[in-house]
Image: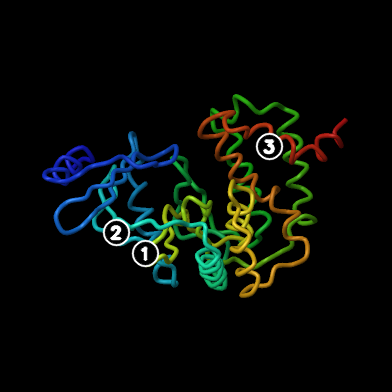
Amino acid sequence: MTAREVLARLGENAEVARLTGGVVNTVWHIRGPGRAHVLKTAEHAPPSLFRVEADGLAVLRRHGLRTPDVLDVGADWLLLEALTPQPLETDAFWESAGRAIAALHDVRGPRFGWDHDGWLGLLPQRNTWTDDGHAFFVEHRLLRYLDEPKADAVLTAEDRAALERLCARLPEIVPAAPPSLTHGDLWHNNVVSTAAGEPAFIDPAVSWAWPDVDLSMMFCGTDSPARFFDAYHEVRPLDRDWRDRMPVVFLREVLSTLAHEGDRWGSLDYFREVLRPFRTALR
């Protein structure tokens, strides 16, 4: 059954509204008799996109995070329990979210990677098993985007050289850490609320990786919630310099944005500002 057919079937005698779905998905809220649903769809979706997402939600739930129930999944659609969002401005909400993610990061993996590749947006997330965290991050989270056509079109030879210099010095910037279970796409809009006001987590891109990957998404995005980090620190103490390296780790998300959309949302300016110390060294 196609996404269009699922939407038509569920939309009979129901109230259908389009929700914000980011840059990849079209998301529908369907309120019918008895239960509300959320239907995620994507044009030209890779065949495994939504099945991998459903698996990721199940992994997070098994390890203690609240996620929406997965009701059904197809090649280009995912049907989920509809959560009832509540205002997210309260300290208590973000404290609970911070503690939940800290507990998730205490789940340790055997190596960096995952037992299959996943997706970040509509592009593959390479999860090849790797013993060294710095090598994993360099190869599969940074350099892997350079050959994507939209990134290739906007990055100069100087941009690439600066990134390679940063990669060579990454062990000086990011301390070694064991592989932890990570959400993988933890910006604030992927934390929603249950009817009871508890945090729930959506749109994962799971892997065994550095906790810094999740923290950088939350820290460097807009509306960074301070109480999230305070509560996280209470469960998993953060070292003194953690804030300083967040922009560097966030380059994974910046490069993904360049690869998906080219130079939008100020991504290229951000990329070049973070790399400015490494660019200067080339001259």
Mark 1 or mark 3: whose residue is earlier in sequence = 1
Q: Residue at x 36, y 59 (%)?
A: 55
Quarter placement of the C terminus: top right
Q: Amino acid at mark 1?
A: Ala
Question: Marks 2 and 3, how far apart in space?
Answer: 36 Å
Which of 60 and 114 lies nearest the eye of the viewer?
A: 60
Question: Sequence order check: which comes first, mark 2 or mark 3?
Answer: 2
Q: Residue at x 61, y 35 (%)?
A: 146
Q: Crowdedness of circle 3 by 10 Å Cα count: few (<14), some, many (20+)?
A: some
Marks 1, 3: nearer the viewer: 3
- Looking at the rendering, which quadrant does residue 54 occupy? bottom left
Name the residue beneath numbered marker 2.
Answer: 70
Q: Amino acid at mark 3?
A: Tyr
**Kind of residue at disc 2:** Val
Q: Nearer the viewer, residue 35 or 55?
A: 35
Measured as percent of width and height from the top left, residue 265 is found at 58, 33
Residue 95 picture location, percent across and down: 55, 67
Q: Is residue 247 left or right of residue 276?
A: left
- Residue for badge 1: 58
Q: Residue furthest bottom?
A: 235
Q: Earlier in the sequence, mark 2 or mark 1?
A: 1
Q: Residues within 10 Å of mark 2 (few under 14, many from 20)?
A: some
Q: Which residue is mark 3?
A: 270
In whole angstroms, how far apart are the C-alphas of marks 2 and 1?
A: 8 Å
